[in-house]
Amino acid sequence: MATPVVLVSVLQPGLVRLTLNRPSSLNAINVDLLDELTEALCANQDARIILIDATGDRSFYAGENLKEILAPKTGSAEELRNSFNKLQHITRLTSSSSAVVVAAVQGFAIGHSWQAITGGITLRLTQIVGLLKAKEVLITGRWVGAEEALKLGLLSEIANDPKHRAKQLAVELAGLPAVAMASSKMQLERAVFPNMEACLQDEVNVASCCFAQSDASKPLPILPHERLLAKTARRQFAIQHAVNIFPGRTFLRMAGADISFEHDKVLVMMRSSVEMVFTWLATNRLGAVFVPINVELKSITLKHVVEAANAKLIIVDAELSLELQTVGFSDNDSIYAKGGDDTPMDSFSRLMDAKAISNTHAEVTPATTAAFLYTNDVLYCPFPLFHADATALTVVPAILLGAVAALSTSYSASRFWDEIRDTGATVYDFMGATLALTCKQPQSSCDRDHKVRLVWGVPIPHFAKVYEERFGHPLFTLYGSVEASLPIFQPGNLPAGSCDRLRDGFQLCMANDMDEDVPPKTPGHLLLRSDQSNSFFDGYYGDAANTASALRSLWLHTGDLAKVDEAGNVYFLGRVKDVIRRRGEIINAAEVEEEFLLHPDVVIATAYGVPSSFGEGTEEDADERELWEWARAHLARFQVPDVIELVNEIKRTSTGKIEKHGLGIEGGVKFDRRPGARQSS
């Protein structure tokens, strides 16, 4: 029979002692202790005095590893929430019962031990120490020594032998008139804790939210020598810790290369797959650096990227390995081709241990995603895993929330909604021309046959209302980048064209080409700064010059143009390199493109700048003129293009954005708006 983790003993009639009995774990709570403590409190509600102490002399209660100990079966947010509700029930059983509870606090008392000691945390702490001190203690999570705890009113007294003194006090209280003592306690509780249930439920909601988006799922550091060890010998401590938890596990060893230490780089050239997700999470688990690269890279560009990465290991899809061979990496022993015939060792299969890997990765998702994603969501993303949309904004939130990430191998307008329906997606994101291409598909009676409740991305097109009406779900937008995370996002109604307002903790500046401030509603360079550490990127790898330029004047220069109104709403105008300047006017290429997309015969369009002098023209093309006349009727004069070219296909990147690099002024029909002028081709 297993040893009870809560020992129950009757010291005398009406006096019951409950002893927390996990000394080897410093009495840290787990599901068994939580259940047995709750059962013991329920069974002894008729006692006059309940004495709570703990075995050992180092810790009364050492906190909890929320996910591993309070949600051991599934690790899910739902299981953890059930445990939180049980913790709150301890408050009901201690503060609302007629029994007087005496706690012998010897050693550490962390986290939810204060449920039993004070009969609640948030509201009770405020009543005891005052609002400002309660904020300071809860927000910082700092240690409070016995002397300070006594001054704050968290303890009634300090004793050399807390257990002996607590027992002595319990015996003294047991000799007092039972009815008067119980009545006094209940009257005081009702007077200071009238909204107990609302407060307890709010604490559950807050705890669940924190677990979904922060470090709350990590075990608390308990002993000073453990913190010192982690600080002074981080690598050795991490390895030893991993060995203790996973004895005999080979982490990653391929072709003589061991990936075990921080800063080792693993370059991955793979199409989206479950194996790529596992590889990414396993690499992060080891403390190595995951370097995913675009699978479309070729020739000199690919060679430069691979050389700059200086990776210890390269993992590549077998069908892509030829590209590496053509740029001189065919003899590199550190290359592993997934799907090839020459698997170097069986340890790759051990790397693919999804359960062990996914439970360790918990810090890269932006906190904003928790504001609108839920545990029962299915997050669909059609973009490749070398892009942050698929990783940081889809897979990671799904892992942290206990939701589902549904990844497509690539975006396809024709099969987009079929994949949405097949996966049961409730949320998807967009960027580039994906909404335009999707909207251009033939209308169907199945357009609203889906479970989607939310769609978010950039940019919000001018035809957003048409899209929302057709497919039956709202579109939300924001502003973010790999360099800046998601600094601009506030859920709620937005002015037309706005990508939202700045989040707390960030600063924004709109500047001209000389980094001088510009007035509200004036287009300018978008500069950002954060009040918090690690909010922005560290820099461009191996490119000190561009890093210094991007971070000059203590501002992150995003490379984007925008404008901000008096209310702080940000309006994204486009990348600096994509914006067209004409006679002093700034033209947002996306706005021009979107207007042409409203024409029923246009599937996709791209606008880009060309020199203003084209020479004389002689011939006329009706199709191009029709579109030019359309532009004159629907666009501002300065937005009307001078050249229109019709092509069978416009090249797009793997994330759905228009590939404007390489576009020129050759071909197409050139227009001159001067009276009597003719167009040329």
Image (cartoon, grey):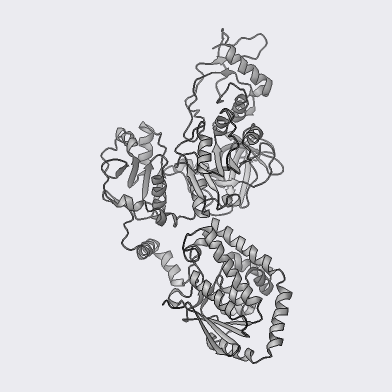
306 horizontally vs 658: left or right: left
Which quadrant of the figure has residue 171?
Answer: bottom right
Which quadrant of the figure has residue 494?
Answer: top right
Residue sitting at 58 percent across and 78 percent down?
41
Relative to 466, is 81 above or below? below
Q: Return the residue nearer the eye: 470 or 526.
A: 470
Q: Return the residue nearer the eye: 560 or 186.
A: 186
153 horizontally vs 362: left or right: right
Give percent across and percent down for residue 65: 49, 66
Relative to 463, is 141 above or below? below
Q: Is there any visible trace of residue 537 in the rendered image?
A: no
Q: Residue furthest top?
A: 618
Relative to 382, is 137 above or below? below
Q: Is there any visible trace of residue 25 in the rendered image?
A: yes
Give percent across and percent down for residue 186: 70, 79
Quarter of the figure with the C terminus: top right
Quarter of the figure with the N terminus: bottom left
Give percent across and percent down for residue 24: 42, 76
Relative to 206, is 576 above or below? above
Q: Return the residue nearer the eye: 159 or 429.
A: 429
How many numbered marks, from 0 up? 0
Give percent across and percent down for residue 628: 62, 17
Q: Residue furthest front?
A: 445
Residue sitting at 70 percent across and 76 percent down?
189
